[in-house]
Amino acid sequence: MEPERVDVTRSFLPPKEEYMAYVDTIWNSVCLTNQGPLVQEVNAKLQSFLGVQHFEFVSNGTVALMLALHVLDISGGEVITTPFSYVATTSSILWQENKPVFVDIDPETMCMDPNKIRKKITSKTKAIMPVHVFGMPCDVEAIEAVAEEYKLKVIYDGAHAFGAVYKGRSLLDYGDITTCSFHATKLFHTIEGGAVIAKDSKVNKKIQLAMRFGHNGDMHYQLGINGKCSEFHAAMGLANVKYLPELIEKRKHLSDTYDEALRGHVKLLEPVSGLQRNYAYYPVIFRSETQRQKVQSALNEGNIFPRRYFYPSLNRLPYVQGDPCPISEDIASRILCLPLYPSLEQSDQQRIIRLILDKLVK
Ligand SMILES: *Cc1c(COP(=O)(O)O)cnc(C)c1O
C-alpha cells in the first residue's frame, strides 16, 4: 500500500465546535464583515500577543504590502528588495508601479545583505523592502542605519516572522511598517488574512482609511481599496490563536529531530543570537543542484512533497529585468523546505529522514 501523501505543510484546524461557537455568534449578530465584533477581538488579541503599538488585520499578506507602499507614498520609484522570497514581495512593488532593485542575500541568514544596499541606491530609490525569510531576522540595525542616512522608508515583509522574538521584541516590530500573512499555509492562519503593523500613528490612521476605500461615512479622504477581512476569517483566527504556543512547541520538537538527523549532511538554519525562533519552516540546502534534484525525486516517489522555497530567485522572474544575484540564485537551486507541521507523524518524519540520508550517501 502506498504511504499517505505528505506535503510541505498541512493547515492546523481547531476543534470544529470551537470554530462553530464563533460562527453561532455571527448568526446571532448577523454582522458578517466591516469591523464586526470578531474582527475587533482578533485584532486586539493579536496586537497584544505581539506587543506592538498598532496592528491592522487585513485581507491577506499581499494587500498588506500594497497598502504599506501606498500609504508611505512609494510609487513611481525604485524599491530595494531581496530576490529570495515569495513572489508577492516583488509583485507588490511592481503593482504600485515601482521598479524592484535586487540586493543579494547573506548566505547564512538568507536575508538581504545590508552591506550591498548602498551600491544600489540612486536618486529614484524610495524604500527598502527586506524579508525575514523563514523567520530569520534581517540585520535590522544595519538596514535602519542605511535608511536613515539616505532618508528611505523601510517596509519589512514579515510573512514568516509571526511568533518570532528578536532582542526582546516581536520581529514584526521593526521598520516603518512590517506586514504579515495569515494565509492557511502559514504558522498562524485565519484561512486568508494578513496584518499591517505601522510604527507611526499617523501612518496607521492612513492604513485604517486606505483598507476601507479611503472614506469614513460620507467623508472621502484619500484613495483606498478593500483590504478588509470577514468575521468568518476572524473566527478562525480566534479559534486558532490559543493553540499557538502548543503549535510552536510541536514544530520545535520536529525541527530538533530533523536537526539531529541531518546536521553535518546538509546545510541547516543555524541559531541566531537574540532570536527566539518560531519554527515556521524547515529549509535544508544541499551540496549541489543535482543532489537537491535526486533527493526531491526520491521523496516524491515516496509520496512526499517538499517545496522549493524559494525558486526562482525573483530577479529571474520572466517579467522582471533584475540584476544578477549569484548567491540567491545558487541557494534557490539547492534548497528544499521539508514537511513541517504540528500533526506530522513521527513515522513519516523518520521516512523523510531515511529517504534523504539514503540519497546523500550514494
Ligand atoms: C505568504 C507570503 C506572502 C503573501 O501572503 P498572502 O497572505 O498569501 O497574500 C508575502 N510574502 C511572503 C514572504 C510570503 O511567504
Image (cartoon, rainbow, N blue to C red):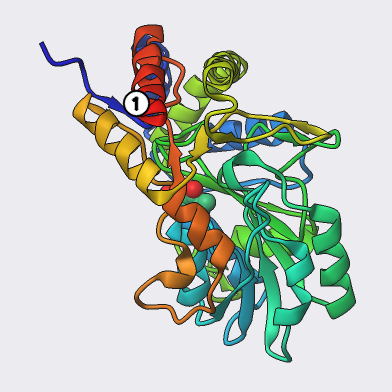
Instruction: Tell me the residue at 77%/41% (across/down).
Output: 52
CB of mark 1 near ligand 1 (< 8 Å):
no
Q: Residue furthest left?
A: 1
Could you tell me which secondary element the residue under label 1 belongs to? helix
Q: Nearer the viewer, residue 6 or 210?
A: 6
Which residue is located at x 50 percent, y 22 percent?
240
- Residue 130 is situated, as x and y percent measured from the top left of the image, at 65, 60
Farthest residue in the front direction? 362
Q: Is residue 182 visible?
A: yes
Locate residue 106, reporting x and y percent.
68, 56
Q: Residue furthest top?
A: 347
Residue extending furthest toward the bottom = 123
Front-lying residue, 78 or 188: 78
Q: Position of residue 9 (x, y in %)?
A: 38, 30
Quarter of the image for residue 119 reads bottom right
Residue 58 is left or right of residue 26, and the answer is: right
Quarter of the image where one finds residue 336:
top left
Q: Residues within 10 Å of mark 1 (few under 14, many from 20)?
A: few
Q: Is residue 353 above or below residue 149?
A: above
- From the image, tell me which residue sits under label 1: 27
Q: Quadrant of the C terminus?
A: top left
Q: Is residue 171 above or below residue 217?
A: above
- The amino acid on which the numbered mark 1 sits, given as a three-letter code, is Trp
**Does residue 59 appear anywhere in the picture?**
no
Number of marks present in the image shown: 1
Q: Position of residue 178 (x, y in %)?
A: 67, 53
For the N terminus, give its image quadrant: top left
Q: Is residue 136 left or right of residue 311?
A: right
The residue at 41%/36% (across/down) is: 185
